[in-house]
Image (cartoon, helix red, strand yellow):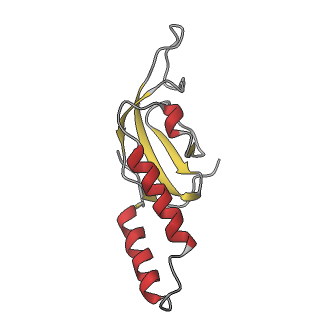
Amino acid sequence: MHVIKSIFLPLIAASCAMLLLAQEPGSGITQDCKTVERALETYYSLKPGMTRGEVEKAFMLEGGIQFASPSRYTYKGCRYIKLVVEYELSRRNGLDGPFLSSGDDKIKELSKLLVDYPTMD
């Protein structure tokens, strides 16, 4: 999956590490790093075969025109953390089409977490 001008999450982790090193001793982990940690925990809990509904508990659809698969999401805790998910679409009542999605669609493939500015409508 191709996402233009995106920086992968390892760069965020490196940034958090630099922030931690730059802090005064004993000051602890920043709130930003905790948000990244929660996003990583959520990301690593997602597996192929899980449903769209499970993805959408922690991620929301990003703005802009989208098809049912792949779908672009932003993490609910930080709109700059993104994820692209490719689904195996479920057939609902015999309906089919590139825009019809269902909470029962199954994850086929997950991108790495990405960092980029939000897409606005």
Residue 33 sits above or below residue 107 on the image? below
Q: Position of residue 21 (x, y in %)?
A: 42, 86
Q: Is 59 on the left or on the right of 18, as rendered?
A: right
- Quadrant of the rendered image containing residue 87: top left
Which residue is located at x 58 percent, y 59 percent? 78
All told, the count of numbered labels is: 0
Which residue is located at x 50 percent, y 19 percent? 97
Q: Position of residue 106 (x, y in %)?
A: 42, 28
Which residue is located at x 41 percent, y 82 percent? 18
- Extreme-front residue of the structure: 26
64 or 108, which is in the foreground?
108
Q: Is 43 on the left or on the right of 118, as rendered?
A: left
- Extreme-right residue of the structure: 121
Q: Position of residue 11 (x, y in %)?
A: 38, 69
Quarter that holds the N terminus: top left
Q: Position of residue 98 (x, y in %)?
A: 49, 25
8 or 76, which is in the foreground?
76
- Quadrant of the rendered image containing residue 90: top left
26 or 76, which is in the foreground?
26
Q: Is 47 on the left or on the right of 95, as rendered?
A: left
89 or 53, which is in the foreground?
53
Residue 79 sits above or below residue 85 on the image? below
- Extreme-bottom residue of the structure: 24
